[in-house]
Image: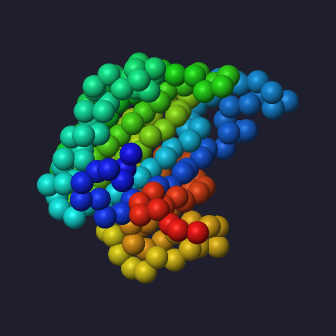
Amino acid sequence: DVAKLPGLKGAVSRVYTGDIAALYLGPDGSAPVSGGGFFSISATAAKFDTAAHADAALRELQRQYTGGNQSVDAFHLKAVKIDRVGDGAFAYTGATRMGQLDGTLGIVVARNGRYIMTATGFAMGEDPVPPMADMVRTMAGNKEGGAVRKTGGGLHTGGLWSLLPLDQGLPEGVKANMDLQLYPVAKP
């Protein structure tokens, strides 16, 4: 539960999707075909009150991925090496099945100062970690700022949303689809 991480000030998430029909379905739309690309990616940016709390959150997240977590074990995830991202990062990947689709699950988590950035994605025909590591690297290079505004498509800009890519820094064929405020939870 993200709200239980000490020093958490805010967390937002953006869901990205690939062109599922074009990449994965046969001519009649009923059967998967061989192809490649991302089915979906979920990216998160979280801000902490101090870099020390962000570092503790990074270690806790890594512990959850290596400590016999049932959901991790179900995907048979294995640690993979990635080039440096921010002040520290880790990544996991593993073969999995989503409905009728065989593919690969990838997870990239990085800390940059007081921020934790994550990308979790499902891809077919390619290793999702390298493009997601590039995406997280883009997030680490972005700056928080400006007033939060809702775009015409229901996405957000400004504040923590500024860390999450809208158009640039995304893997090929992926588009921003939906935003979620994770913490603090918005009140109706």
The answer to whether residue 173 is left or right of residue 72 is right
- Between 100 and 63, the one lying in front of the other is 63
> Residue 75: image x %, image y %?
45, 22
Residue in view at x 73 percent, y 38 percent:
21
The answer to whether residue 58 is left or right of residue 16 is left
The answer to whether residue 166 is left or right of residue 117 is right
- Is any part of residue 107 visible from this angle? yes
Q: Which of the 4 image quarters holds residue 155?
A: bottom right
Relative to 157, residue 47 above or below: above
The answer to whether residue 98 is left or right of residue 50 is right
Quarter of the rendering occupied by the N terminus: top left
> Residue 187: image x %, image y %?
53, 68
Residue in view at x 58 percent, y 69 percent:
188
Q: Residue furthest left?
A: 52
> Residue 164: image x %, image y %?
43, 60
- Between 134 and 109, the one lying in front of the other is 109
Relative to 37, residue 177 above or below: below
- Between 163 and 141, the one lying in front of the other is 163
Q: Residue furthest bottom?
A: 147
Residue in view at x 48 percent, y 71 percent:
157
Relative to 167, residue 150 above or below: below
> Residue 10: image x %, image y %?
36, 63
- Is any part of residue 86 visible from this angle? no
Residue in view at x 16 percent, y 58 percent:
51
Task: Report the label total.
Answer: 0
Q: Which of the 4 image quarters holds residue 50?
A: bottom left
Q: Which of the 4 image quarters holds residue 141?
A: bottom left
